Amino acid sequence: MSSLDALTAGERGPQPPTEAFVPTALDPNTRADKFAATSAERFADAVLEREDPLARRSPWRTRFEDLVRKPGLVLALVWSAVILLAAFVPSLLAPGDPLDGVPADKLQAPSSAHWFGTDQLGRDLYTRVVHGTHLTLAAALTAVLVGLVVGALVGLVAGFVGGVVDDVAMRVVDVLLSIPALLLSLALITVLGFGTINVAIAVGLANVASVSRIMRSEVLRVRTSVFVEASHASGSRWWTTLGRHVLPNAIGPVVVLAALELGAAVLAVSSLSFLGYGEPPPAPEWGALVAGGRDYLRTSWWLTTLPGLTIVATVLAAGRISRALDGDPGRNR
Amino acid sequence: MSRYLLRRLLLAAGVLWAAYTVTFLVLYALPGDPVSIMYGGESSDVTPEQLDALRAQYGLDQPLPVQYVTQLGHALHGDLGSSVVNGQPVTTLIADALPPTAQIAGLALVLAIVVGGGLAVVATATRSRRLSGFLLSLPPLGVAVPSFWFGLTLVQWFSFQIPLFPALGNQGFASAVLPAVTLALPTSALIAQMLSRSLLHTLREPYVDTALAKGASRTRVHLRHALRNAALPALTVTGLVIGGLLSGAVVTETVFSRAGLGRLTATSVSAQDIPVVQGVVLVAATVYVLVNLLIDIVYPLLDPRIVTGSRRRATPPPPPRSADAAPEPAADRVPVTAGGTR
């Protein structure tokens, strides 16, 4: 494990435990005994599993059966579908008005009429959570996009150009990584001002460093490949090489990171909106909903618990899907 | 050894200077006028002339490079400016706010190491697949829980349902328990993740088989042989862990209405008190740099290969040396795909 892995793991939280495979496969010469064990295992695998006529089934059926064996992933996909639905057509899931309260019904516990209960103004909490989805999700997506685009650009240029540009860019990245992401976002918000968009930009910019680092290391890996050399040799211009050969081959891990980042971004955005830097009060951002329930903690548990659980489920779903994208079949549950 | 130390010290100083520069650029050079941000807005009974006078007072009418050099000079003499809200020196504000935050952060760190480390050890030691699967699924859950919500949930259960701890305030040890637990959650998840991964890796090393073959008990091999070696790579994230505690304090102290560095940050951001925000960010960077410096100093004592560098990389280099670390993922990636296609 390199320090880069350590850093990104630290920043990003859950990461697929990939290096489990390293010792046996990396160094067959110095660990002959281990290697022997694995090749025996592989042989056993081949004998036992290749009998399975998977190849004869249709790929869709295989994929479907794969899915059924991973209930966690299915759940994550279903939840994401619900969240997307809530973000794009909230009125389908909750036809009411999120800002419209019935004072007579204030602070009611969850029931069949009000699934998530009602708040101190008699507004239906379920409706508010559903209608808040697009605010939170849009902010998180914007944050990821900002981080991805800026970070990938920096990493691409640093890795491809190399030399002084690379040195300077990577030193700046080092420094940015020495400042905790939330504090960096807070500093940016101080200057940019409050509101969902500013929060999203601040969260996104705080992530540029780690994205550009991964992008750079991928570019460095791809840059030395034979096909890049061939592209140079056959006389293509540098931007063609960059755009047609380097970028498509280097972007994979960055996209996986972005999927993982989405969960982290939902957390960061809702933390900042909890602290009160998002949209002003009536807007039902998830973090703000939890903050609004704070004063009624003693009597009305649902006001904080249910929006909070929604955030947890969304972050978990994003993490699970990004692990699936990373394609680490042995580890998935 | 002394050359190694000197290099590390210089690097640390360089990172600090750069962190100062970055915060300066973010806070003063981004489009946007600090004075009108700080004094304008809703309470805009300030006239343009007064704004100009304020700009002159803070030296903000000077060209940016001049401002930068002046401020950096002040900062080197320990003067980080003063709060625009109450006029107190930033250093005093931070010095006052640091102890309560250090209290809960320290408590949280101990908790996180015990819980996270314990989880990693048990999860890798147990023979029960179900137990280890369950334990290893906890860290991702811990990272997914927003700490503000976790804190509020703790208050709900352990202050209101079962009145064990006060819900808010700074009085005594009891009031530090719930904030520390809140802070410890993401940290322990991170530690558990790092350590269990590192342990799984280490347990496949040949010397583990050797130790077992020579008759050492499983417990002894796990704790004396594997854990010691596995803990080294986990040490590299300590800087991140501490930084995480600091930024976690912003949310935690707001939830529990505790005075401290986090609360100071939150109120300063709300009031757009730029000098204080800059001071806090610098403190965070300083803490990160100091922790990593400490790790760099301790590391060679734990693993002499780091200084002599005679062997192939067996443990990752410490974080600041990232330039040499950069091409490594390329090397790491090969076995990953090899394992994936199995």
Image (spheres, coloured by chain):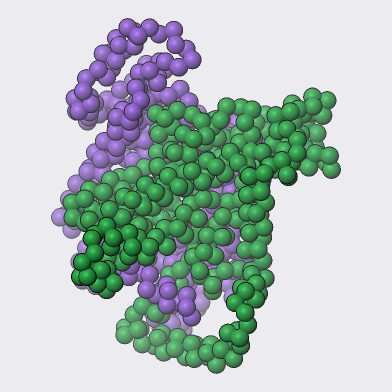
Chain colours: A green, B purple
Q: Is residue B186 above or below residue B103?
A: below
Q: Is residue A110 left or right of residue A161?
A: right
Tell me the quarter of the picture where residue A239 sits: bottom left
Image side of residue B258 versus residue B16, left or right = right
Image height of A56 relative to B144, above or below: below
Using the rendered image of the protein, determine whether residue B79 is visible from the camera's viewpoint: yes
Q: Residue at x 63, y 38 (%)?
A: A132
Left/right of residue B33 with respect to residue A72 in the rendered view: left
Which image quarter is the N terminus of chain B in?
bottom left
Residue A275 vs residue B257, the one in the foreground: A275
Q: Residue at x 40, y 38 (%)?
A: A184
Residue B70 drawn at (x, y percent)? 20, 25
Q: Is residue B223 at least partly visible in the picture? A: no
Q: Nearer the viewer, residue A276 or A31?
A: A276
* Location of residue A125 in the rendering, given as x and y in whole percent from the top left corner: 73, 36
Residue sitting at 47 percent across and 44 percent down? Answer: A143
Q: Specify the quadrant of the image occupied by residue A236.
A: bottom left
- On the image, the x and y values in percent for residue A82 come to 67, 51
Q: How many marks?
A: 0
Q: Residue at x 63, y 44 (%)?
A: A87
Residue A277 placed where, x, y %? 51, 31
